[in-house]
Amino acid sequence: PNTISSSDNDEAQFSDSYMDNPNASFPVKLHKILCNPEYSSIISWLPNGRSWRVLQPKTFAEKISPLFFRHARFPSFMRQVNGWGFHRISEGIGENSYSHKVRR
């Protein structure tokens, strides 16, 4: 029987090329931003790995948003966050972070 095999390298290449696609979905772009260590002082995962927080909204809007989205306004980014079903955590250790019911 014919089987399709792929190496880890092939999967990594597919994943990287998909994430570099300018037409990628909002969650794909957000994940790429969150996984980039250069941005960790501006936006980062919380230690639990299930939620994230924008640490510097103004810097995010000025430096990161224009690279990934068609706007440079923080409220526009937050509208997308809410529109894609992310929910703000309003209390506890993750206060003011965002998570989604679909976890990593």
Image (cartoon, rainbow, N blue to C red):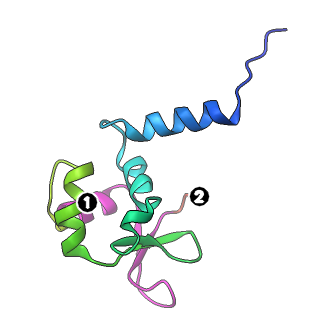
**Above or below for 74 versus 28:** below
Q: Is residue 89 left or right of residue 82?
A: right
Dot 2: element: loop
Give the label on residue 64, or none. 1
**Above or below for 89 versus 13:** below
Dot 1: element: helix
Q: Residues within 10 Å of mark 1 (few under 14, many from 20)?
A: some
Residue at the image point whose x is 21% and y is 71% from the top: 59
Task: State which region is magenta.
Answer: 76-100
Q: Nearer the viewer, mark 2 or mark 1?
A: 1
In-front residue for pair 104/90: 104
Task: Identify which amino acid the numbered label 2 is placed on.
Answer: Arg
Residue at the image point whose x is 41% and y is 77% from the top: 97
Q: Position of residue 94 (x, y in %)?
A: 48, 83
Any magenta on residue 94?
yes
**Above or below for 90 versus 104:** below
